[in-house]
Image (cartoon, grey):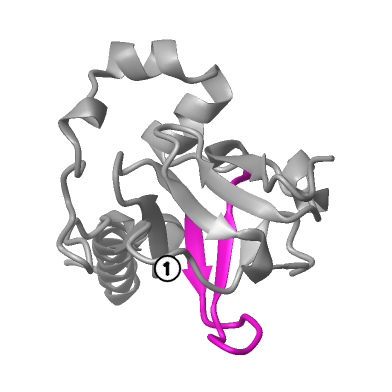
Amino acid sequence: MIERRMLLLAGTAFAAIAAAAKFGEAETAMTDATAQPASGDFNLSEAEWRKRLTPEQFYILRKHGTERPGSSPLNNEHRKGIFACAGCDLPLFSSDTKFESGTGWPSFYAPLPNAVATKTDRSFFMKRVEVHCRRCIGHLGHVFDDGPPPTGLRYCMNGLALKFEPSASSSS
């Protein structure tokens, strides 16, 4: 005879495993339908990406990693300029949209036009919106709806996924 308690435990365990499997999957449909690199120049093999990037950049851009909060020098970058993709140099964010979010990662309220793509990320038992470079599909970070006006968005980016190019007027 199966005890009622054993049956409940088995049912609970099965439900937990099913939920973990569902929430652990990341959806692959890009919201702007740019699932492949926009340029053949950045359709590189894993070995080519490893040569092009530091190990830390490779982990973030190609393996969807995250750097430690507060570890990026770009958190304290306040000059005028452009934040570009560290993988392919595509301009992504203007310093005009950067703000202090207090999260430990460089944050922006809007990307440059046609710079990023997004997809739903269901890893770590939560649903988030992952942000990628439109050209090389490198992982940049996530976007949240708790940012400042005018967009109300917070593009929380990994500093190692970006490189800063100061404008001519701020570099002198």
Counting labels gives 1
Tell me if 48 is positioned left or right of 89 in this view.
left
Q: Can residue 161 be seen in this view?
A: yes
What residue range appears in magenta? Answer: 141-159
Q: Residue at x 43, y 67 (%)?
A: 126
Please tell me whether mark 1 sits on a helix, a strand or a loop.
strand
Tell me if 36 is positioned left or right of 137 in this view.
left
Tell me if 164 is positioned left or right of 53 in this view.
right
Residue 126, above or below 79: below
Q: In x, y percent, where is residue 134?
A: 31, 51
Q: Which residue is drawn at 66% across and 84% down?
A: 148
Residue 168, above or below 34: above
Q: In x, y percent, where is residue 75?
A: 77, 51
Residue in the foreground of this view, choosing between 49 and 95: 95
Identify the image quadrant of residue 78.
bottom right
Tell me if 43 is positioned left or right of 83 in this view.
left
Based on the picture, tell me whether residue 147 belongs to the magenta stretch.
yes
Identify the image quadrant of residue 22.
bottom left
Q: In x, y percent, where is residue 38?
A: 19, 44
Q: Which residue is drawn at 41% across and 10% down?
A: 51
Amino acid residing under circle 1: Arg
Q: In x, y percent, where is residue 142?
A: 48, 61
Based on the picture, tell me whether residue 139 belongs to the magenta stretch.
no
Residue for badge 1: 128
Q: In which quarter of the image is the C terminus?
A: top right
